[in-house]
Amino acid sequence: DCEMFVPEERRSVHIPSQTQTTMYNANGNSIINTGNEDFTGGNMTLLDATGNIVCKQTITENIVTVNTSTLASGIYLVVLSRETIHKTVKLIITK
């Protein structure tokens, strides 16, 4: 699990549909489904708009749960990586 900073109100989350990776919001968590791409054993890194690491965790299955309830509204990048496979998707959090 990731530890987030500065508790805030619950946020809604949107990932643009042009990516095969899907995400939905449930109970203050963002659920990331990596689809048919296998990132198991790799890492999920969440970066803010300035490139700072907000959260980093090991991927243990194709569904990754991240607590985003404490994040401020804004644009974030979700970086999925394992060995030579890397994928970056935009995460937009709004009130």
Image: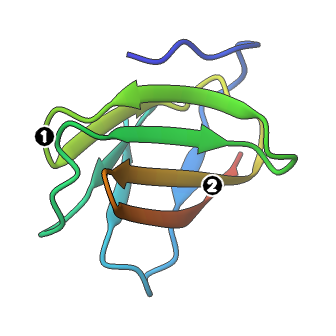
Q: Which residue is mark 2?
A: 77
Q: Vertically, is 86 above or below 76?
A: below
Number of marks drawn = 2
List the single residue furthest toward the front. Answer: 84
Q: Is residue 31 above or below residue 72?
A: below
The quadrant of the picture occupied by the N terminus is top left
Task: Please tell me which residue is depicted at 71% across the width and 45% down the height of the picture.
Answer: 95
Decide if residue 27 is in sight here.
no
Q: Is residue 39 left or right of residue 50?
A: left
**Contact (CB < 8 A) between labels 1 and 2?**
no
Residue occupying the far right of the picture: 50
Q: Residue 55: which quarter of the image?
A: top right
Residue at the spot x=29%, y=40% of the render?
A: 42
**What is the crowding at mark 2: few (fewer than 14 residues within 10 Å), some, or many (at least 20)?**
some
Mark positioned earlier in the residue sequence (1 or 2): 1
Residue 4's x, y, as percent?
A: 61, 17
How many neighbours does mark 1 have within 10 angstroms: few (below 14), some (14-19), or many (20 or more)?
few
- Would residue 14 appear left or right of 64 to someone viewing this image? right
> Which residue in the rendered view is the most extreme toward the bottom?
18
Secondary structure beneath dot 2 equals: strand
Could you say which is closer to the camera, residue 69 or residue 62? 62
Residue at the image position 56 percent from the left and 48 percent from the top: 12
Look at label 1 and name its amino acid.
Glu
Of residues 65 and 38, the one drawn nearer to the viewer in this rendering:
38
Check disc 1 and report its element: helix, strand or loop: loop
* Amino acid at dot 2: Leu
Rendered location of residue 19, percent (x, y): 40, 80
Q: Position of residue 83 (x, y in %)?
A: 30, 51
Residue 68 in view: yes
Q: Which residue is labeled 1 in the image? A: 61
Where, by quadrant of the figure, is residue 5 drawn?
Answer: top right
